[in-house]
Image (cartoon, rainbow, N blue to C red):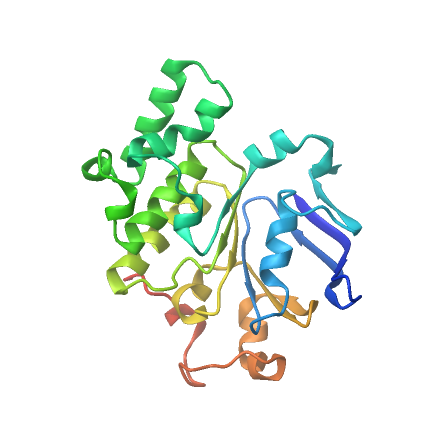
Amino acid sequence: MLQVRGLSRSYRNQQKVLNNINISFPEGSFTIIAGPNGSGKTQLMRHLNGLLKAQEGEVLLRGESIQKDLNHTRRSIGLVFQNADSQIVGQTVASDIAFGPENLRWPREKIREATEQVIRELSLEKLRDRRPHTLSGGEKRRTVLAAVLVMNPDVIVLDEPFTGLDYPGVQDILKDIVRQNKEGRTIILISHDLEKVLAHSTQLVLMNKGEITASGRAEELLPHLEEYGIRRPWGENRTLKSMTWLKP
């Protein structure tokens, strides 16, 4: 279980960007974090694997502080940022996927096997030798996801993974995310595109002005989203079951 306890962070002018955040992400859960721009969602994400160190409070993985062993933390908790280009470092898709294991000095055969497995899993065979900058937005996102998955993380955190993608691109990345959750990985997904993914969630967390304003099951919070500053462009009569871009 990943837990956040009393997490707070302030700018130098003392303005709070996170204020006493307390939340748990059970193993195998699928949490969606939503809220207006500037509500602290990405700041929270950056604390979950130690990219930012808590000024107050702590983040625990299975009861231990993530700061105890950051290398282990970052293998266990993978981040996928909104801007895929910021995470791509390899000259080809295959070399980008292999970059993390190479940095950790895995044995060469283990690197090859793990890279090939992820390429097959995400159906990236036709892209393996492509230069990442030539890929579409969806292909870049899947490459970054593959580079995270090759480390075999327990938790995957994704920041606005559907931004800028067309319908097929959203479907591809959503299928990959849902499959990872069904295989037992904990998913934490930051998104304002709730109608694309809400049906797959086990927990919905709403944030505003650096605080968690509500959390619970999506079906309980769905009728009250506008009370928490979440616009519902899809209308008032959509059922939770219909709120996915995956075909039945």
Which corner quadrant of the image does residue 110 belong to?
top left
User: Which image quadrant: the C terminus?
Assistant: bottom left
**The one of 199 and 9 positioned closer to us in this rendering:** 9
- Furthest-front residue in view? 12
Q: Residue at x 75, y 49 (%)?
A: 54
The x, y position of residue 131, in whole percent, is 25, 40
Marks counted in the figure total 0
Q: Residue at x 24, y 34 (%)?
A: 128
Q: Residue at x 53, y 71 (%)?
A: 219
Q: Residue at x 25, y 48 (%)?
A: 135
Report the side of 71 relative to 65 (left or right). Answer: left
The x, y position of residue 66, in whole percent, is 70, 38
The x, y position of residue 3, in whole percent, is 70, 48
Report the side of 248 relative to 68 (left or right). Answer: left
79 relative to 111, above or below: below
- Furthest-left residue in view? 126
The x, y position of residue 28, in whole percent, is 54, 45
User: Which image quadrant: the N terminus?
Assistant: top right
**The one of 232 and 45 positioned closer to us in this rendering:** 45
